[in-house]
Image (cartoon, rainbow, N blue to C red):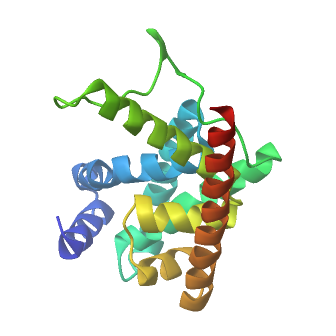
Amino acid sequence: MNEKEDIILVKETLNGNLGSFGELVKKYQNQIFNLVYRLTANRAETEDISQDIFLHVYKNLNKLKGELRFKSGLYKIALNFTKNKLRQRKFAFFSLDKPIQTEEGEMVYETATNGQTPETILLEKEAERDLRLMLKNLPLKYRTIFVLRYLQGLSYEEISKITRTSLGTIKNRLFRTHKILSRFIRKNKIKKNETF
């Protein structure tokens, strides 16, 4: 689906067709869940926030139709809801390595093997762990921009619109994020070498 289809689905929803809103939810639910989870690192909280986001969007859909893109408005709401939740917690950093609690018990994140060797799987798991650790140590304003740009694949212009931040500030924050991450990688590389 493209932007024009989003506009059609929004209009149909405003005319009482709930199925059209269901299509919008299907289209964006995974992206919003991933965005919120990368910022909160809590699956249960992410599910709650994601539901609240879509409920808020549904109740305020007539205000979103003025947006150039439905997606931009949805991302703005998702970021605001998530940031507010983090502020309510009074802290923004937490462990991303904890297993996820489900009805069946604890689940640990595992990557699909796709015929890969055990060494490759181990390296990928280490890379995922390192990424989570790096994200955990980034201040929220940098983490948000990093997640939107590199994990959600949004353009600078989209990020600017969603976060209501100038392009220069976004580029500056990404530059600073790269510096922070480079220092983090060098520091951890030295620590790993010292342990051998």
Most extreme residue toward the top, as rendered?
Answer: 104
Most extreme residue toward the right, as rendered?
Answer: 90
Q: Is residue 160 visible?
A: yes
Residue at image position (29%, 60%) is 13
Q: Where is residue 116 in the image (x, y as percent from the top left)?
A: 21, 31
Camera-side residue of 137 and 160? 137
Q: Is residue 77 left or right of residue 86?
A: left
Quadrant of the frame with the C terminus? top right
Q: Is residue 192 left or right of residue 18?
A: right
Q: Position of residue 29 (x, y in %)?
A: 36, 48
Residue at image position (73%, 45%) is 93
Residue 9 position by quadrant:
bottom left
Camera-side residue of 153 and 128? 128
Q: Position of residue 151 (x, y in %)?
A: 42, 58
Camera-side residue of 191 and 132? 191
Residue at image position (42%, 78%) is 158
Quadrant of the frame with the N terminus? bottom left
Q: How many marks?
A: 0
Q: In this view, does 72 lie to the left or right of 168?
A: left
Q: In this view, does 163 lie above or below 148?
A: below
Camera-side residue of 49 and 96? 96
Q: Can residue 60 be seen in this view?
A: no
Q: Is residue 169 above or below residue 116?
A: below
Q: Is residue 184 left or right of residue 113?
A: right
Q: Where is residue 75 in the image (x, y as percent from the top left)?
A: 47, 65
Residue 175 position by quadrant:
bottom right
Residue at image position (67%, 65%) is 180
